[in-house]
Structures are given as C-alpha cells and as structure tokens.
Image (tube, rainbow, N blue to C red):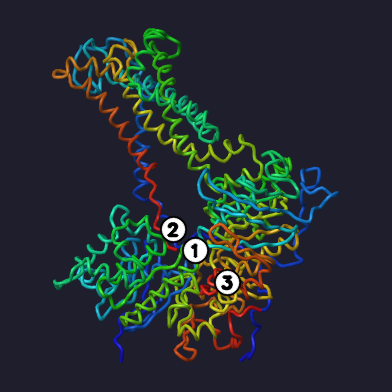
Amino acid sequence: MTAEVTTKLDDEAVRRPLTPRRVELLVGLTLIAAVVLACLVVPLINKTDPNALVAAPLQPPSGAHPFGTDQVGRDVFIRVFTAGRVDLTLAALGVIVPLFLGTVIGTIVGASRRRAVDVVTMRLTDGIIAFPFVVLVLVVVLIVGADTQIPPLPAGGASILVAVWVVNWTIYARIARARTHVLREEDFVAAGRLLGFSRRRIVMRHLLPSVWPATATYAVSDALLLVALIAGLPFLGAGIQPPTPEWGSIMYEGRAVLTQAWWISLTTAGVVLVLGTGVMLTVDSLIANPRRVRIP
Amino acid sequence: MNPFEPKFNDVPKDSVVVAGEYPPMKALTPEEGNHISDATVPDNAIVATDVTFAYGSGPAVVKNVSLTVPAGGAIGIVGESGSGKTTLAGLLIGTLTPTTGTVTVQGRPWNSVRPRDPMRRAVQMVFQNPYTALNPRFTALQTVAEVYQVCGSHNRAEAADRARDLLKLVGLSGSAVGKRPSGLSGGQCQRVGIARALAANPAVIVADEPTSALDVSVQAQILNLLDDLRKEQGVALVVISHDLNVVSYLTKTAIVMERGEVVEQGDTDELLQAPTHPYTQALIASIL
Amino acid sequence: MTETLLHASNMAIEIDGRELVSNIDLEVKKGASLGIVGETGSGKSLTCRAIAGVLASTGGRISRGTLTISGEDITVPSAHATSKLYGRMVSLVPQNSLSALNPLMRIGTHLTETIKELETEGGIDPQHRAVELLGRVGLRDPETVMRQYPHQLSGGMRQRVMIALAIAGRPELLIADEPTTALDVSVQKEILDVLRRLSDEENMALILVSHDLGVVTAATRSVAVMYAGMIVEQGPTETVLQNPRHPYTQALLQARPTIGQTGRLIGIPGAPASPEDWGTGCRFAPRCPHAQPECEAAIPTPEPVGNQQIAACRRVHDLMVTHPAGAGA
C-alpha cells in the first residue's frame, strides 16, 4: 500500500445523495426551469399573435384559450408567456451586468490596502443605496426617456436597464467587499504575498473565485426582485409601454375587471408565483450551509 | 513461535521519506531568480538585531529581541500564547516592520525589499492549520505549479512537471496530487504547504506550529520531512512551537520567550535538559 | 467489591446506517479513572458522546450491544435517564469551553442556574455553593469570577468554570472531552491536576477522552487505546505505557519526539484509516509493520496479555516486544 492514503477527514459520514437541502434545490430549479421553458416554448408552438383580437372579450379559461381572453379580446395565455420572455430577458440582463461590475469592483476595493479607495467607493455606494431605489429608477427612466426604443428591447426597456445597472451594482460590490475582507486574512493569501504574487494575481485567482458564490447566490434572488420591480413600474406610469405584453402591465390592466374576469390578473400572478417560489427554494438551499457535525 | 521480532528501529515498509532516495530536485537556477548568487553565500540567513515591535501606540509586544538564523541551520522559538512568538515570526518574515531595530535577510534589511523583489521569496512560511493554508479551489498540483509559473516563469506544462516532482519529493504522488484540500488529509495538506514553500527555493522556512494540528502518527512523518529537507536541501528552519519535544527534535539552538522578551537562549539540548531560567524550568516541568 | 458505574458491552455506534464504532467493551468502577485515547477517525469522540448521552445531536445511535450506567440501561435514550442521570450521576465537561458558555451571561448566573436546577433538597444557597465550587476548581478569586463574563476569562479559567458546572450535581462519573486542547502547556497540567484532585477527593470516577497520550498518562490509572472505531488495547496506564502489546500502541508511543532523543522518529506510514478504508480484517493491518495475510481475514478478538491488559491483535503472542516504548531509538 502506498504511503499516502487519500482519505477524507474525521468521522464525517458519507453524504447521502438526497438530503432535504438537495431536494429543495432540485425542486427550486425545476420550478424556475418550468417557467423559463414555458416562456421559450409556448410562443413557438402557439402562433397566436399576442396583440391580435382573437375572440370575444372577457371569456373565461377554455380549451381554446387556457387563460381566457382579456378586455379587448386578446388571448391571455399567449400574452402571459410572451410577456415572460420580456420580463425574464430584462431580469437576466439587469442582473448580469451589475453582478459582474459589482463583484469585480467590490473585490478590488476589498483587496486594496489604500484607505482612500475604500472610503470613496463605500461612500458612493452608501449614497446610491440610501436613495429610495424606485425613485432613482424613475428619475433615470425619465432622463433616458420612457419611450426610447433600442431594438430588440421593447419600448421602455432600455431605460429600465440603464437605471437598474446604475443602481444595482452597489449591492454586489458591498457583498464582494465584505467577503474579500474575510478572505484576505486567510493563510493562503498571506502565502501568496510571501511568494511575491502580484496583487492582480491574488485578486483574480485567489480572491475572486471564492467571492463569486456569495454574489451569484444573491443574483438569483435579485432577478426575482427585478421582475417585481419591472412589474410594478406600469403602476407608476413608467415601465414597458403597451401594447408590448409584460407581466406587470397585464396584471395592472386586469385589475379593473378583477371581479368579472379574475383570470387575467390571477393567471399571470400564478406564473410569477411559481417562478418566485422556485427562486426562493433555490436560494435557500444554496445559502443555508450547515456543516455536518465534525467528530474529531 | 518467534521470540524476537524487529523492534521499531527499522524503517517500516512504505516509509514516506527515506534518505538517499530523493529524485534529483530541479531547483530554480540563478537565471530563474534564485536569490542566492554564487559570489556571496552569506553565513547567516536572517539576523534580527535588537528588534522591538508595538502595534500603533500600544505596548511593545516584542522587546529587544536579537537572534541569528545561520544558513542551513535550525532555530526554535518557544513560548506560550502572549509570548510574542507569532509577532516575532511576522518580523522575521518581513510582513511586519520593527518599531526599532532591524531584520536583515542575507545581508539586506527587509525594508529595502519591495514586494516584487526576488529576495522577497527568500523566506517562506509553513502554517499551523494545514487546510486554511491552501486555496480551497486549487488542487495540490495547481498550488505548487503556480509558484513555478510565477517565480520561475515556466509555462504550464513545465511548471506542472516540476510541481509533480516536488510533490513526490515531499511524499505526495498519484491521485492525491490532483485533489483539492477538502479531499486530502491534514498531513497531506501540510505536505502541499511545504512543497509550495520549497518551490520558491527559499533560504529559510519559518514553520509556525507545523504539526500541532496533526495526528501524532502523522506528526512524525512531517517532522522527519522538515528535518530531511533541511539537511538535503540546505534550507534553514525557524520552528515556532509550544511543544518542547518538537523543538528539541528539529533544532540546534532555541530561544524561550515570555511576554515579548527572550528569557533564555542557547543550544537546544542544553536549554531543555538543564534550563537556568525559572520560566523555562516551569515549561519543562509542565510537559506531560 | 466496588460498584460498577459504567458498563459497555459489545457496543456499536452507527450514524445514518454506517457503523462507525464497533465492539466496545468498557467497565468503569466507582472512583476509577479511565483514559480513552485515539487519533482522527478512532471513534473516541462518538464513544464519549454515547456515554455522556449526547449521541442524538450527531444523528447517531447505539446499534448493537448495551450501555449501562449505574445499573440503568441507557442503550436507547430515554427521558427518564436524561432527567435522573445526566447532570447528577453522570456529567460531561464538553470540548469547547468558549462556545459552551453563554457570552451574555455572567459566570455566577451560569452556576446558580445549574445549581437550582440540580438541587432537589432545599436549604442550599445557590450563591454560596457557586462560590464554593469555583474555589474547589482552583480559581483564586471566586467572588470576582462570579461577576465576570466568559470573554473576560482566560482559556484555563473558563475550563475550570466548565468543570465547576459539571461537578455542581455531585456526579459519581465525570466525563471530560479533550479538556486540555487549545490550552497552554502550563495550564494543561493545572487543569489535569484539578481533575485528578477532584476525582480523589470525591471518589468520583473520571473518564478522560483525548488525542494526546501525555494528557491521558498524566491523569488516569487505566487506558483504552482506540483505532478506526475499535479498542485495540486496554489496561493499566503504567503497564500499557511501559509495555505496549498492540503494534498500533507501540507505534504511537514511538512516534512522539522526546527531549534529548538522538535517533530518527519512526512515524506510522499513511494516515489514520477512515471508514471507507476499513476492510473485513484488522483495521490497522494496512499500516502495521507486522501484518501477515491472515490479519486481513477477520477482526482480531481482544486477547488478555497479563496483568489486566488486553490487546486486539492476532499476533500479539508472537510479538514479544520487551524494550520500553517512548524512550526513543
């Protein structure tokens, strides 16, 4: 037998494949995947024009129109999933850019020993975070112009994205900075410095890879918050302009006829709920990190 | 019935490090940034002269300490918590700057060595906790190969080869080399840490409690490894430990610290077998 | 004949269906002191928890054999046993004193709460008793300590407080789990002195679990050496130390450096075996210099080797090791 026995530590029992955490993660991802897939696939299969008048208005759900029709006679089913494409795309774009920007900036600031860098950046982020988020978004939207259209984004989409990018990177930067502060005290980082590794190398290869999990986990729930924000904007007069379907505007328009035609708002809400539950389960399972009791 | 079986004086089978069986170690050549120039090989690897250190305006944590680490020698620093031994380690390594006094490495004071100066690599460290000393996302091979890439400007393939050789030298080979710290035992992680330090071809390795987090049976392997490396590779050792037995085994001279001051120093064996200072005597009396 | 306080018979412990500790036979009489020594993966901590009744927190259970304390069978945890035994008859000094104490509660409150909980008959002033306990564990200024918070005390002082809490219920059996880890050398000795003194004064049985052979040697009269979930050697501490019969014990004693030793240290090749590596035979065989093919065939049964010493080695009678261990080469 060779001298080096590759062994696991301690009395750690073998991890079973299906712990409650794993189940939670799987269910969460399945729910998210279901909604995303539906938004991709339904408009491909069902060729109904979401803006066309296809039947009598305010029809309850039926075989031909699973989610019924709205006040002007459009098919709600196709509208909901077409809207999903819009919302999800905006959410994804709205999260990815701040995620990368914020994580990189936060890590560099966290790794910097120069107090000035830290103070300036933190006061800047403090300022942005302190401002009421929605107000800030509205201001940017108004500056950029609620109607500006940059294809292929729908009208109003560009302004929302820019607003979110300007504001949201700060949260990721904070998370990254905090995590980096902890990491840079670790022995292996000290070892890197002793070996003469450049600051760049330490940040890129030793700090960032361990910072991503923290910010990426937040990004998943941020995406959902973003969907909620976008859905809420029409209620404030901003947001995606009609007639482009968007979850928030569908629900907004459905409010007026809620008692007669519950299906307009509620089916939309149901889809958002499924997505939200999936995100919540996924994030919960990733964040909760109970280490098995280590028996020395 | 066999009346006699060999006692444990023999080297047991599958012994990890056996003198004379090392594959030839390809150390960094002078062109690659080996700090030791052929012209002048100084006698002393590290010299600390009347060093005092205090954090900010607080009390001195290290007071008037002087010591010499001879090239290829081994010196022990003994003390309990609060003795200042960890701070002294930081001063010897150059991460802390003395409030008064100087620490020179191969003749050059630390404050003349910039972070990118090859001399920075002359003193390396082996840490107490074998797991946190390694990047959890790097495999053993990557951890060591990186040193060759950065310090020796090798390309990936060469660095990997050298890393493999070095890991084999310290007793890690086969599939273990491709594992991350979480898949390795404490002893194996410590070997990786030692290999990483060695890859920089240092003049001195400062080992801070190198075996106190390891099982007894593994401690012996690592202690032997450090001892062999010093003898075969000529690396000086500074061993910081509360464990007098470890210091006795590895070092020729030792200093005993209490509350930041050196209370006794000298030949390790003499110090431990016939201590003169009451604190040293008390420490030895406490050995279980 | 002195009363038997603890009796474990062929006890096995499993977690999630995996047996991690097997064939434990232990007996502790009133006033005795036993050390359980083992490295990583030896199962000593699980065994310690089983005895102390806190196995449930690890998700484990005693899967075979029996465990009896003071005549009461506690193989299966019961509420009755928990309320009657633990804290009173049997008490545990847990491993990590810093996290075992409530950082927001003064030491005095820790003690008085415990005392009130445990004292059934009235007439005892908890404050008074608390100060008395702190004095008994060797704290020099008990009244001051009563008013302090855990973070204000040194590691050694906190450990003494943990011991005071453990003896508050006047236990007949005290279990100390790694009582000296993370303490300075000089403090370690003091803590062991406290434990030994209490054991003598109260005729209290003591079980000391540690990875450190020196600790166990200093404070116990008998010792059980564990490896890979099993007891490989048991006997009077002096005897086991002077004349270890199991190859693992021999190797362990040889592997420690001693002051003034001239020869090379002989370590044990490889690393302590973990459950995946356990075969059907002797679990130490892969690392044993004396292993023969038949060693891997079946788990060796404990063999008596004279003077109450037992070693679980198939070849123990073949290997007559007469040199004193631990003396260096």
Percent across and percent down for residue A265 are 22, 21
Circle 2 is placed at which residue position? A14
Label 1: how many residues lie within 10 Å, few (<14), some (14-19) or many (20+)? few
Q: Can residue C256 be seen in this view?
A: yes
Q: Nearer the viewer, residue A271 or C200?
A: C200
Occupied quadrant, residue A42: top left
As helix, strand or loop, the secondary structure at mark 2 comes to: loop
Residue type indicated by callout 1: Glu
Contact between marks 1 and 2 (CB within 8 A): the answer is yes
Could you say which is closer to the camera, residue A244 or residue C233? C233
Badge 2 local density, few (<14 within 10 Å), some, or many (20+)?
A: few
Give the chain letter at badge 2. A
Mark 3 sits on what residue?
Answer: C286
Identified by mark 3, the residue type is Pro
Question: Are both tags, 1 and 2, on one chain?
Answer: no
Vertical position of residue A97 compared to residue C250: above or below: above
* Chain at tag 3: C
- In the image, residue C42 lies at what x, y percent? 46, 69
List the residue tagged with mark 1: C276
Between the residue at mark 2 and the residue at mark 3, the CA separation in whole angstroms equals 22 Å
Q: Is mark 1 on a helix, strand or loop?
A: helix
Quarter-wise, where is residue A55 in the image?
A: top left
Q: Which is nearer the eye, A237 or A87? A: A237
Q: Which residue is drawn at 73% across and 51% down?
A: B201
Co-location on one chain, circles 3 and 1: yes
The answer to whether B154 is drawn above or below residue C77 in the figure is above
Q: What element carries label 3?
A: helix
